[in-house]
């Protein structure tokens, strides 16, 4: 049985963490499979969005026992190399041209919460639970903090990573960590309906919007305006934009 199930439904690619007996805990092979699947999806020009979800009762419980054992037995250089490999997963999610969406049910804890947070959009059941509990075992959710700090206030980020408490989907939405909450009973169909929006908007415009949003991080105001002008001009040259303008003018 593959640790990552890959399925395509129309223009949507579904990547399902498939270790339900381990609460979809992350190990080296699953992280590697996610990276490959994301790169493969990025190369498919027929896709409009990618969804990451979990099999069984939970989205993802974080690192599995073998990964924790490896951490405890490795030296600094080995741990740094390993951490950089995980950081690459988050980088790939941002590099992928189309939206990457996490669909969270059950628990998303530690690295699992980090994986959800690292996606462009986070959808959740109303009963899902989140948390960054690493501090409780002397660890730090260090890699995801690069994204967490961009999603919530500094004060909120500090509390989340230094207290390690679990929180509800409603609280996560208040923090600014998730986009939408759906009923658990209708979650699958609600996620499908939500993603159907991407079948009715311009793929090139969405790709340019993602590029603009993330490249703007850390820029000065003037530099951000200049990047906006460049993306604006690039959008005008796309087939989608030309066709859209022509259609609008004929109304």
Image: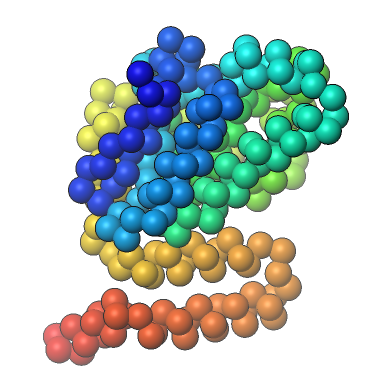
In the foreground, 100 or 171: 100
Q: Is residue 20 visible to the viewer in this orientation of the structure?
A: yes
In the picture provided, is 43 more to the left or to the right than 144? left
Q: Is residue 152 visible to the viewer in this orientation of the structure?
A: no
Q: For residue 163, which quarter of the picture?
A: top right
Q: Residue furthest right?
A: 76
Q: Residue at x 33, y 65 (%)?
A: 203
Q: Residue at x 23, y 61 (%)?
A: 200
In the picture provided, is 234 more to the left or to the right than 10? right
In the foreground, 164 or 48: 48
Q: Position of residue 65 (x, y in %)?
A: 62, 12
Above or below 151: residue 70: above
User: Where's the N terminus, which quadrant?
Assistant: top left
Q: Residue at x 36, y 69 (%)?
A: 204
**Colour option used:** rainbow
In the picture provided, is 83 more to the left or to the right than 207? right
In the foreground, 165 or 36: 36
In the foreground, 69 or 23: 69
Above or below 17: residue 190: below
Q: Residue at x 85, y 29 (%)?
A: 76
Q: Position of residue 64 (x, y in %)?
A: 59, 16
Q: For residue 15, which quarter of the picture?
A: top left
User: Where's the C terminus, which quadrant?
Assistant: bottom left
């Amino acid at each position: 049985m593959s640790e990552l199930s890959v399925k395509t439904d129309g223009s949507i690619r579904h990547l399902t963490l498939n270790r339900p007996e381990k609460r979809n805990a992350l190990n080296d092979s699953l992280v590697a499979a996610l990276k490959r699947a994301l790169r493969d999806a990025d190369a498919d020009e027929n896709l409009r969005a990618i969804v990451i979800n979990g099999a069984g009762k939970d989205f993802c419980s974080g690192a599995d026992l073998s990964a924790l054992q490896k951490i405890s037995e490795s030296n600094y250089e080995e741990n740094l190399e390993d951490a950089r490999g995980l950081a690459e997963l988050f980088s790939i999610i941002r590099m992928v041209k189309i939206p990457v969406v996490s669909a969270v049910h059950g628990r998303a804890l530690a690295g699992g919460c980090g994986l959800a947070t690292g996606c462009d959009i986070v959808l959740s059941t109303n009963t899902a639970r989140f948390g960054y509990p690493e501090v409780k075992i002397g660890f730090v959710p260090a890699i995801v903090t690069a994204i967490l700090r961009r999603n919530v206030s500094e004060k909120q980020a500090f509390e989340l990573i230094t207290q390690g408490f679990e929180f509800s989907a409603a609280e996560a939405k208040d923090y600014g960590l998730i986009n939408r909450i759906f009923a658990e009973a209708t979650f699958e169909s609600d996620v499908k309906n939500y993603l159907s929006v991407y079948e009715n908007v311009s793929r090139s415009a969405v790709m340019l919007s993602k590029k603009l949003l993330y490249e703007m991080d850390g820029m000065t105001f003037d530099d951000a305006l200049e990047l906006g002008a460049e993306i604006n001009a690039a959008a005008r040259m796309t087939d989608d934009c030309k066709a859209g303008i022509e259609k609008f003018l004929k109304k």
